[in-house]
Amino acid sequence: MKSEKLQDAIGEVKDSLILDADTGTVRKQNSWIKWAAAAAGAVLILTAGILYVSGSIGRKEDPDGKSNAAAEQESHDEQSDSAAEQDHSGPAVIFSEQGLDAELVEDPSEIAVNEMPYVSREEAVGHLNSAGAVLECTVEEISRIRVPEPGSDSVWFITTMTLSLNRVIRGKTEEERFRVVNAAVTNMPVDFFCYPGLEECRKQMHAAFILRDVDDGEVWTIGDQEISVKELGDYSVVRCLSFDGTNIQYENYSIPLTELEN
Amino acid sequence: MEDSRIVELYWQRDETAITESENKYGRLCFSIANNILRNQEDAKECVNDTWLGAWNAMPPHRPEILSTFLGKITRRLSLRKWRARTAEKRGGGGLEISIEELEECIPSGQRIDEGLETAELAEIISAFLETLPQEDRRVFLRRYWYFDSIRDISQRFGFGLSKVKMMLKRTRDKLLVCLQKEEIWI
C-alpha cells in the first residue's frame, strides 16, 4: 500500500523523460503487434448533439440575468427522482426504427467515472475562454437511454435534453432553445455512463453548458446501423458545469465571471 | 497524422481523434496496460477507456506530447484496475514483483508523507532521474513506468539480465538516498 504513492508519482514524471525511455535504443522490438487488429474496431466514445430552434420567440429573460441557485436546487431535488419527467419517446423511436433496442434509464445512480488527468485552474479558465459560447440554460426535458450494440458487449448510453437559454455567459448565440444529445459507449458493467456533469442533469435544473455544432454527415455506427446524429439534433454537450450566477464550477475551481473574456 | 492535428480533432470534438489515437498509440497503450494487468481483455478495456479519458480531457488539456499523455491515462486506469483486482485477492500479473522492488526505495520504518502531493513527489523524482546517466534512467522508467519485464528490458537495450538487475538495484538505492535527503519520510 505504501508504495502506491511512489508508483503513482513515478507515473507523473516529466513527459520528456517518459518519451526518451520509449524512443531510446531498441535492439529488439517487443512483440505486441498482434493485438492491434483485435483492438482496432473497439473505439468507444462519441458525442453528438442537437440544437433546434423551437420558434418560441417571446421567451422571457430572467430579470436580473442570473439564477437563484437555492431555489433551483430545491426545484431540482423535488423533481429529480421522478422518472415521469423524462421524455424518452423521441430518441427511443429513432433507435427502434433502426431495429435497435433502446432501454430507458430512469435513475442513473451508478456512473462510471474515469480517473481524469489533472486540470489546472489556468487550463479550466482557458477552456471557458476558448469555447465557442458558454451558456446558462435550464433543462426542459431530459431522457436517458441505453442501447446495446448488436454483435458486441458494448452498450451505448445516450442522453438527450432540451435546453432553454437563460443567459449567455460568454460568446454569442442566436438561439433560445437547444436540443442536445450526448453519447458514451463502454463495455464496463455500469448502470449508466456519461460525460462529466451530465449525470447531475435533471429537469428544471440550471447549469452552464458548452455546446458544439453537429456536422451534417455525422453518424453513429451501432452494430451495422448508422444513426444520423443530425436527425436527432444540432448540438452536443462538450461540458456541463455548475453555475450559481456569478461563479462557474469547473472541476475543483470556482471561476468568477470576471475572469472570463467576452 | 501529426499529434498536434489529433489534439486539434479532440478540441473540435471530432470523433476521428479517437480512431487516429488508436491507430497511432493503441499499441503503446495496450502494452502498458498488458504489462500491468497481464490479461488481454482487461488491458483492452483499459485502452478503450483511455480514449474516453482523452476525449473528456481535451479540452481543456492541450498536451505537448500526446503519446505520454495517453500513456499516463492508460497507466492510471490499469493500476486502478490492478489494485481493485488485488483488493479482491485476484491479483495476478507481473506487477507484484516490481512493487516489491520499489518498496526498497522507501526509507524503512516510515511511510510516504500523506500530506505530500503526488505531483510534488513526481517533481522530486523527475529531478532525480535527470541526474542519472541516460541508460540508467531509461532502464528505470522501462521497469517502473512501462512495467516491462527484466527480460524485455534486456532485449530492448541489448544488456544481459544480470546487468539490468544490477542497474535497477543501483538506481533504487540512489532514489532511496535522494528521498532521504529530501526528507521525504516514507
Image (tube, coloured by chain):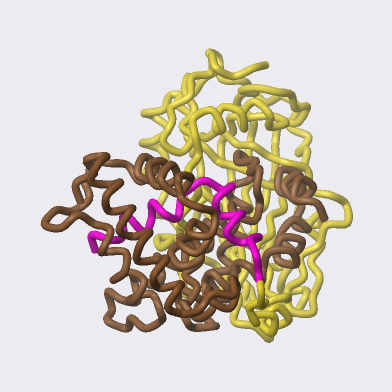
Q: Is residue A123 above or below residue B117?
A: above
Q: Which chain is yellow?
A: A
Q: Is residue B122 above or below residue A136?
A: below
- Give percent across and percent down for residue A43: 68, 69
Q: Is residue B87 left or right of residue A24?
A: left
Q: Which chain is brown?
A: B
Taking the magenta stretch, the answer to whether it contains residue A138 is no
Q: Which residues are magenta?
A: A1-26
* Residue shown at the point (66%, 43%) measured from the top left: B64
Overall secondary structure of the magenta section = helix
* Residue shown at the point (48%, 19%) measured from the top left: A256
- Quadrant housing the N terminus of chain A: bottom left
Would residue B142 be seen by someone viewing this image from the given angle? Answer: yes
Q: Is residue B82 above or below residue A164?
A: below
Q: Quadrant of residue A235?
A: top right
Would residue A201 be seen by someone viewing this image from the given angle? Answer: no
Q: Between B30 and A166, which is closer to the camera in this rendering? A: B30
Q: Between A213 and B43, which is closer to the camera in this rendering? A: B43
- Quadrant housing the C terminus of chain A: top right
* Residue shown at the point (47%, 23%) measured from the top left: A247
Q: Is residue A172 above or below residue A206?
A: above
Q: Is residue A157 left or right of residue B183?
A: right
Q: Between B2 and B183, which is closer to the camera in this rendering? A: B183
